[in-house]
Image (spheres, rainbow, N blue to C red):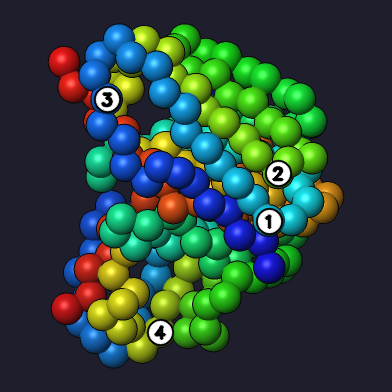
Amino acid sequence: DAGVTQSPTHLIKTRGQQVTLRCSPKSGHDTVSWYQQALGQGPQFIFQYYEEEERQRGNFPDRFSGHQFPNYSSELNVNALLLGDSALYLCASSLRAGEQYFGPGTRLTVT
Amino acid sequence: ELKVEQNPLFLSMQEGKNYTIYCNYSTTSDRLYWYRQDPGKSLESLFVLLSNGAVKQEGRLMASLDTKARLSTLHITAAVHDLSATYFCAVDHGSSNTGKLIFGQGTTLQVKP
């Protein structure tokens, strides 16, 4: 049974660019949540997708947007990248709002 | 706004010793989670605590929840080097289960031989 997968593993972008991160949930899960973890900090909730709609959102600007596909996979898009967007981006999947299982993360570096 | 605070933030201990990590949260919540994170890695789920008085144990780790005090503890018994990692508690944001987790700052545990 495949767990949560994320791609790419690492990414380097330049300020002002746009980036798309991808997440495939654990088999049987229908909800995807995204978190940003800056170095030395706890993860911060970005948003949650269920039934292809954004259901909840944390305190992140509109530069952060997402999408969920009919197969439950999800994308996180960040526009106009800032140096402060450098972080580990974690995707977590769950069945509705049940226990979340985290993927390996995507390490984004903005230069 | 829900706030989650852990203490201590850093803990250096000798192998064989016992210690407790504390997690306080500011508003009512139905669920509390403990995760482990190794450097450069993702989060590994340790415990899910669902009700007042819940206690769960796995190996040398035991977690408990007191919803009235809004406090959870993670107790380490006879620490070994393999337990060195950062431990996070996370609380579900809503009074009913929402799936929006608010994390503490993390406690970095260093176990010395």
Residue at point 55% right, 71% down? A66
Cα separation between marks 4 and 3: 44 Å
Give yes or no for contact between labels 1 and 2 (Cβ–Cβ under 8 Å): yes
Report the chain holding disc 3.
B
Q: Which residue is mark 2?
A: B70
B2 and A34: which is toward the camera: B2
Q: For the residue marked with disc 4, what is the amino acid?
A: Asn
Mark 1 and mark 4, same subunit? no
The residue that disc 3 covers is B13
Depth check, front residue: A49 or B9:
B9
Q: Amino acid at mark 1?
A: Ser
Front position in the image: B103 or A81: B103
Where disc 3 sits, the SS reads: strand
Q: Is residue B36 left or right of residue B101?
A: left
The mark that comes first in sequence, 1 or 2, is: 1
Is residue B81 depicted above or below B73 in this figure? above
Write the residue at 26% across / 31% down: B12
User: Compared to B66, does A67 lie above or below?
Assistant: below
Q: Do the residues marked 3 and 2 share a common chain? A: yes
For disc 4, the marked residue is A79
Q: Closer to the observer: label 1 or label 4? A: 1
Q: Which mark is residue B109?
A: none
Q: Position of residue A88 (x, y in %)?
A: 34, 58
Check contact, mark 4 vs mark 3: CB within 8 A. no
Q: Residues within 10 Å of mark 2 (few under 14, many from 20)?
A: some
**Label whose residue precedes the other's in the sequence (3 or 1):** 3
- Which of the labelled discs sits on residue B26, or is there none? 1
Which corner quadrant holds the C terminus of chain A? bottom left
The percent coordinates of residue A7 (x first, y second) are 35, 54
Element type where label 1 sits in the image: loop
